[in-house]
Image (cartoon, rainbow, N blue to C red):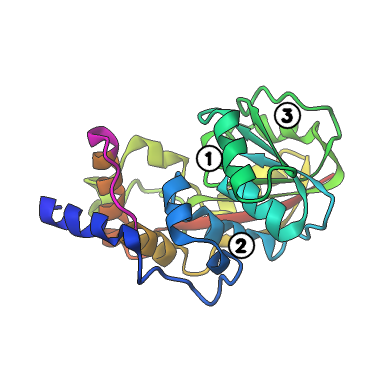
């Protein structure tokens, strides 16, 4: 990508043409510049809205938001559903998350905690729901993780995730057209069928849904086109590569996997 292309992309931060998609009416109510300034991945509010349509959240529930980044998803959960959210994040300081929540009018409902996903500081049986957007694939592919996570949820608690995924596993290796763009970190991407098997064999949850977010790859591409590239040169190069990967693939292999289960 040329420097000229970089500048034209960055110029769109004012976002007069920001895509307020009719299929995501809740997300459309949030200021696009605020979302872009605080995101740490492809529009997490679109992905969360796609998940919560089937998650049955109700006011007053205690929700664990695993890996919320700067807290956009935690704010969304609190404001849209009236739930109490414990935002467990390792890479962003709790004060930063709290400040964002308070400025958004959700400071009384979002409780940031600095925590690693395998070392959660919560009472057993505490949560009524568990949510993770664009982060669960970093820690949840372990065969033992769901067994660990289950201790913090009441029996019958529902868990829902959305993560970068595949339409099907690469049993014969990475497709040739993607091989030059493939990063080893992308091996954490898995298909809905993979996640269904992974959760079911844990014996801890009954899987209620495992599919792809409709047109998820288009959402991914659209968000990449709207957002400015990061200033950090190393991160900028990684993001450029991801952009090219999505453009090249055109939804043949990549998208967002959505999984919902209920703890036994």
Overall secondary structure of the magenta section: loop
- Which residue does the numbered mark 1 point to in the structure image? 70
Picture disc at residue 148:
3
Q: Earlier in the sequence, mark 2 or mark 1?
A: 2
Residue 166 visible, this orientation: no
- Which residue does the numbered mark 2 point to in the structure image? 49
Q: Considering only vertical position in the picture, is 23 above or below 137?
A: below
Q: Considering only vertical position in the picture, is 145 above or below 70?
A: above
Q: Position of residue 8 (x, y in %)?
A: 19, 59
* Residue shown at 12% from the left, 50% from the top: 3
Residue bounds of the magenta highlight: 227-235
Q: Sort mark 1 into few (<14), some (14-19) or many (20+) by Cα contacts within 10 Å.
A: many
Is residue 88 a member of the stretch shown in magenta?
A: no
Q: Position of residue 159 (x, y in %)?
A: 72, 48
Foreground: disc 2 or disc 3: 2
Q: Earlier in the sequence, mark 1 or mark 3?
A: 1
Q: Sort mark 2 into few (<14), some (14-19) or many (20+) by Cα contacts within 10 Å.
A: many
């Amino acid at each position: 990508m040329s420097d000229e292309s970089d500048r034209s992309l960055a110029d769109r931060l004012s976002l007069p043409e920001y895509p307020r998609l009719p299929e995501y009416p809740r997300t459309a109510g949030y200021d696009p510049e605020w979302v872009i300034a605080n995101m740490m991945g492809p529009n997490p509010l679109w992905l969360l809205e796609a998940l919560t349509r089937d998650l049955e959240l109700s006011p007053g529930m205690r929700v664990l938001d695993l890996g919320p980044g700067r807290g956009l998803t935690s704010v969304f959960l609190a404001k849209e559903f009236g739930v109490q959210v414990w935002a467990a994040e390792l890479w962003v300081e709790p004060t930063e998350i709290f400040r964002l929540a308070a400025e958004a009018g959700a400071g009384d409902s979002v409780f940031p905690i600095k925590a690693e996903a395998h070392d959660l500081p919560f009472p057993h049986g505490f949560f009524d729901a568990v949510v993770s957007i664009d982060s669960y694939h970093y820690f949840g592919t372990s065969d033992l993780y769901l067994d660990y996570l289950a201790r913090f949820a009441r029996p019958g608690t529902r868990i829902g995730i959305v993560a970068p995924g595949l339409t099907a596993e690469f049993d014969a290796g990475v497709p040739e057209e993607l091989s030059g763009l493939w990063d080893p970190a992308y091996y954490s991407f898995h298909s809905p069928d993979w996640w269904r098997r992974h959760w079911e064999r844990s014996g801890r949850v009954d899987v209620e849904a495992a599919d792809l977010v409709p047109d998820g790859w288009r959402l991914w591409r659209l968000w990449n086109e709207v957002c400015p590239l990061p200033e950090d040169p190393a991160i900028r190069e990684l993001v450029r590569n991801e952009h090219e990967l999505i453009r090249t693939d055109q939804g043949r292999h990549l998208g967002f996997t959505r999984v919902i289960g209920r703890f036994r």
